[in-house]
Image: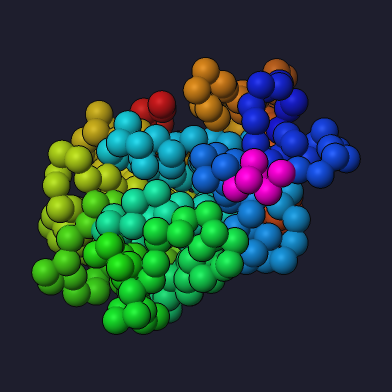
Amino acid sequence: MLRPSHPNRMNLTTMTEKKMTLPIDPRLMNALYRSDFVSFFHKCFATLSGTQLLMNWHIYAISFALEQVRRGKIKRLIINLPPRSLKSMMTSVVFPAFALGHDPSKNIIVASYALDFAVTLANHCRLILNAPWYRELFPEMEISPYKNTEFEIATTRNGFRLATSIEGSLTGRGADILIIDDPLKPIDALSDPKRERVNDTFNHTLRSRLNDQKTGAIIVVMQRLHPNDLTGSLLRDSPEEWTVLGFPAIAEQEQTIRIGDGKTERFEVSIGESHGERFAPGNMPGATAASGRVAQLPRNSQRD
């Protein structure tokens, strides 16, 4: 669970934890949502699920990494987390909405193993973009009346969020931010030809879709399924290129994980125990956590 060791961090969660009884100026809240990704995600989660977000330290870790991408400080990011850890919602739904809010001219492509999954993520992003509170936060971010389909949401500033499958056609399309979300179905993980096809598609097609190879960003978000899955292939071929955020459901090695500027969280292995701290966000049931025990941080990866 998140340890209360960062008293200076101002966001919606810390404000809530203090049980503030005085009315909060809406302008202050809007400024918070615009500037702090954790608070923005908190608001989006309520919009999408209708329930209260149960905070966990990994949300701060993902938020910090994604903000580093948006600000241009990270160009190649891999996020490896167990299932049901909100990684797709944060990376493929909320992050594009946040990025477009700050820059409606951004070109964002989100590719997944299946087109129906990609469309589902796109529809969730559209729900946020159409929310009255979002339009108030980012009045310059307007959806174009000429291009608003289940696959593509275009803006009036020539930006867009485009959904596709891993093997879908992207002829003539380019991205400032390319997001690869679960490129491989779990059932296909044991198939050498299917793994290799995904890896080859990324290397020979998807990564060439960046508008600018130097300034463009690529995010690969997935659970680890096999040593030679896409994450394994990328870290084997060019480990120095990638920043990796990854941990399994149960700690198998001690890690210090950045959750903000100058702030870290320890994911610990208990001394004398056969396993360590359980990675347990509030929405991860025990069975799912157990299934995510496969190492999400490969031995040959780098850590930020």
Would you say 174 lies left or right of 95 here?
left
59 versus 169 height, above or below: above
**Residue 193 occupies quadrant:** bottom left
Name the foreground residue: 212 vs 204. Answer: 212
Q: Quadrant of residue 76?
A: top left
**216 left or right of 293 in image:** left
Q: Residue at x 41, y 27 (%)?
A: 303
Please tell me which residue lies in front, 180 or 267.
Answer: 180
In percent of width and height, residue 243 lies at 35, 33
Q: Nearer the viewer, residue 221 or 66?
A: 66
Whether residue 40 is in magenta: the answer is no
| Left or right: 233 as drawn, with respect to 12 | left
Residue interval drawn in magenta: 25-30
Q: Is residue 292 visible?
A: no
Above-or-below relation of 206 to 27: below
Is residue 153 rendered to the left or right of residue 278?
left
Q: How far across and down, in percent of the image, does residue 31 sit? A: 57, 42
